[in-house]
Amino acid sequence: MAAKTDDRPIILKVENVSKKYIIKNMKTLPSNPTKGQMIRYRLRKFEKNDFWALKDISFEVHKGDRLAIVGRNGAGKSTLLKLISRITEPTEGRIEYYGRVAAMLEVGTGFNSELTGRENVYLNGAILGMSKEEIDKRFDGIVEFSEVEEFIDTPVKRYSSGMMVRLAFAVASTMDPDILIVDEVLSVGDMKFREKCLHRMNEIAASGKTILCVSHVMGIVRGLCNRAIVLERGKMIYNGDVEHAIKLYNGINEEARITSRDLFDLPRPRYLNEKIRMQHVDIIENKTCIYKWDEPIRFVLSVKVNADAEDVSLRAVFSCDNGASAACAFVPLHADFKSGESKNIYVSIDRHNLAPGDYKVGLDLTQDNPYDIYNNVDSITPEAFFITVKNIGSEDHEIEDNSARLWLNSWGHSRIMETTGEVRN
């Protein structure tokens, strides 16, 4: 039997698209450099490396499709949306459009911080190709949906992230685009407004418009989208059925949750002095890396000491699967290490304030003050290991935890203080 063809018109075509970035890393200067090494270092302190954020991506989107783009953080999802939104150009390949595109990506994208909310509405409308008369007709609806009437004549640089998202989504969705592109920016809005946005997207989908969205919430993907693509390390590994895409996505997360991981060869920032190098991490007292909401998180970190180091402590930074910072745990070891030693650091995060979800855990070894980011001896970010927190407590009862969380600062808004650490031979 011949495969069923889709006779709907193609509204977006992505053909063999790749995106390369040039990464600059500071070179390492030897501890006792020769005069020639010093001259070469001063002439060229940085070395350049190619990084392919996307490689050979091809797919078609038909009118009325609701396409989800899923994958772990760093897979290339946001880069792909930026290319489709024409914020940046592909290094290779081409993208063809057949309609008006409206995009809401990072908070504040397309806004001029010095202009008022009102002025930014007209600016964004003009960028979308609308006349002043068309924007005038839709203006009241945009302001009403955004719920920022009181601040519409205030410069947006004074808006909170939530207010910015409200206005950006109101503009993008009310301008009647042929293709609406939404990244995971709704995570900074409150729950009531997120539900309002989802209702609006369902209305847009029901009207036959096309939606492209990135989301780590599989309930949204399942409820809104009719197909999905899965990205992993810049490559498209699947294009098709939503349920199968979700299984692949969850499978990627399951593979990431391992209780033992070598750390020695993972990439580090170039500025480290490498007195101590993290070798291995073992999760203890948990065989799945899946935690109840009130369950302690305990692990053993093996380190190799290359040079004497005093007053060393540890910082564990938790990031959401979408890359947003969630929390930071400070472990005040205040330990001294001698060159040539191999030590094990036992860490127990006795209580945490992590909402249910998937998390990457980055580790920093620091000297003198664990709160000083410039004293890192060794650093693995954002993913030394992975965990999942379930919405279930020690009594195996579910808790109601639907409060909106803001993940804005580099270490998040949840400060974990109840920790203990001990260095052993």
Image (cartoon, grey):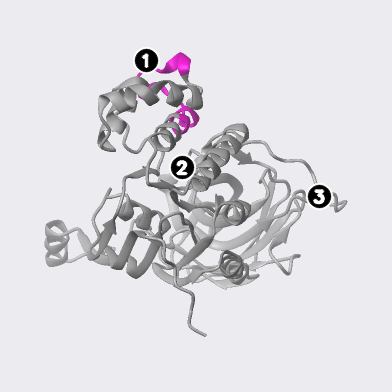
Query: Which amino acid is tagged 2?
Result: Asp
Write down the region rendered in magenta.
149-166
Q: Which residue is mark 3?
A: 393
Label 3 vs label 2: CA separation? 34 Å
Q: Residue at x 48, y 53 (%)?
A: 214
- Badge 2 marks a residue whose secondary structure is loop
Q: Residues within 10 Å of mark 1 (few under 14, many from 20)?
A: some
Residue sitting at 81 percent across and 50 percent down?
A: 393
What label sits on residue 339 in the rendered view? Answer: none
- Mark earlier in primary sequence (1, 3): 1
Three-letter amino acid code at disc 3?
A: Gly
Is residue 116 something that shows in the picture?
no
Secondary structure beneath dot 3 equals loop
Q: Is residue 79 above or below residue 416?
A: below
Residue plotted at (41% across, 60% down) = 62
Mark 2 vs 1, N-terminal side: 1
Give the number of the disc on residue 372: 2
